Image (cartoon, rainbow, N blue to C red):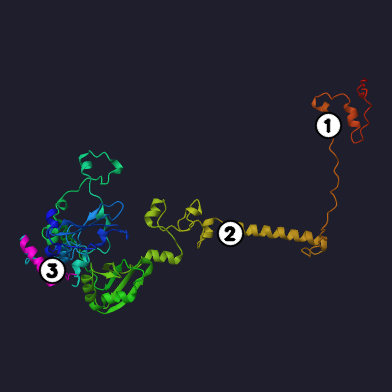
Amino acid sequence: MAHRSMRDPDADGWERSDMPIVCETCLGPNPFVRMQRIEFGGTCHISERPYTVFRWRPGNEARYKKTVICQEVAKAKNVCQVCLLDLDYSLPVQVRDYALGLDNEDEPSSAVGKEFQLQRKVDEGSLDSSFAQQRPNDLLIRLQRNSPYYKRNEAKVCSFFVKGTCNRGAECPYRHEMPLGGDLANQNMKDRYYGVNDPVANKMMKRVSDMPKLEPPADTSIMTLYVGGLQPDVVEADIRDEFYSFGEIASVRIVPNKMCAFVTFTTRSAAEKAAEEKQHTLVLKGQRCRLMWGRPQQPREGGAAAGHASGSMAPPAEVQAAMGLAAGAAVGSGLPYASMDPQAMGTRIPAAGDAGKRGGSDEQDDNADASSKRVRTEMGTGYGAQGSAVAGGPRPPMPPVSYGMGPPPPSQPRMMMPPPSQFGVMPPPGYPGILANRGTVPPPRPPSSVPPPQPPPSVSS
């Protein structure tokens, strides 16, 4: 450190900064972050220049992060000082340059040439890159992240756990998981920055090539596109602004409860062009939406429609066969109970010509009606005998209703208990006298022969 203190930082181009250049993912979800600022705390991993190091913890369960490159190097490629991903799209440099059609062949290969090029950009004032000013193409919109990916901030894998010798248990600050391995385990910081042989970029490019394409349906009469995953604040004008450039739009129908919309074009060619261009690049109100071809509504089957029209709810033929019923059986076809008939649904509905099948039930009903009429006539005759000589005359007037307490009911004779001699039991002594004296006042008790109690004698002193 003695050689650093003897040199002039401004002359050597050492970096002094108050805030780092980092992406939202590396910064963490907490808006209040405490950072450690270490002036000239390390050297840049790309240019080997001393720079100001920032160190912080983006979350409770995240690992500590720090800047690994200086700000001049980060500005030259528009990348984060920690993860070296693009600040606008959160993509590797190799994927971004490939999508924008940038060629990195003019980059110097030697460390001295790279340092000279970087210093020249600093002197000319052209260090701030213009990647954000370029219009994103379909590939960038397809691969970019619209929200932070905080899982990238997790702690590293515990090497002692992999060996089976970690004795910290739950107190270990590292993850107790087995490493995945593969090409992603061999990432190089310089390859990530210069966009050469980056395994993460190669994986993303392969995923793009394997994406399915939206094939148009064989039915040429379909000219409707389905748009799913809409935000609640999306209106019809927003959807028309995205599709009006492909052709004339016949209608736009939004279904709020399903969070989707249907866009219908007037020509099939316009619908195919819109589906090809907006398949993976449709973004409304900052939210990526799904785009598919619409499906025509299938007409209902004739049997089902006829069944609902006639009020019948008969199950299919295979269900009737499983129930042991003949397909198309009529109501009242000799089933034990009306509830077993799937067409009746628990209610016995008489059909035409059902009187003959019931076996003379109409005659029984006629006989029952005649008997009820005869009973009513007899009752009317009885009432007419009391009030009028004509049968069925007016009823006699009812006696007035008393709202007070009515007279007591007539007294009933008391039931006498048979003598016990009839049951084979000898009566107690005096039993006939008791029966003779029942219902009379009992005689007075004779005086007792026991003398009354005497007061205690007094004691004289």
- Circle 1 packing at 10 Å, graded few (<14), some (14-19), many (20+), is few
Instruction: Name the residue carrying label 2.
Output: 362
Q: Earlier in the sequence, mark 2 or mark 1?
A: 2
Q: Amino acid at mark 2?
A: Asp
Residue 28, x across and y down, in percent: 28, 58
Number of numbered discs on residues = 3
Left or right of 97, for residue 433 = right
Q: Do tag 2 and tag 1 residues touch (Cβ < 8 Å)?
A: no
Residue 53, percent from left and from top = 20, 57
Residue at image location 19% in from the left, 67% down from the top: 140
Q: Is residue 113 magenta?
A: yes
Looking at the rendering, in which quadrant would you find the C terminus? top right
Position of residue 321 in the picture relative to residue 154 (left or right)? right
In the rendered image, which residue does mark 1 sit on?
A: 418
Q: Is residue 103 visible?
A: no
- Residue 17, magenta (yes or no): no
Q: Report how far apart the C-alphas of labels 2 and 1 lie in the structure.
A: 60 Å
Give SS at disc 3.
Answer: helix
| Drawn side of residue 167 relative to residue 404, left or right | left
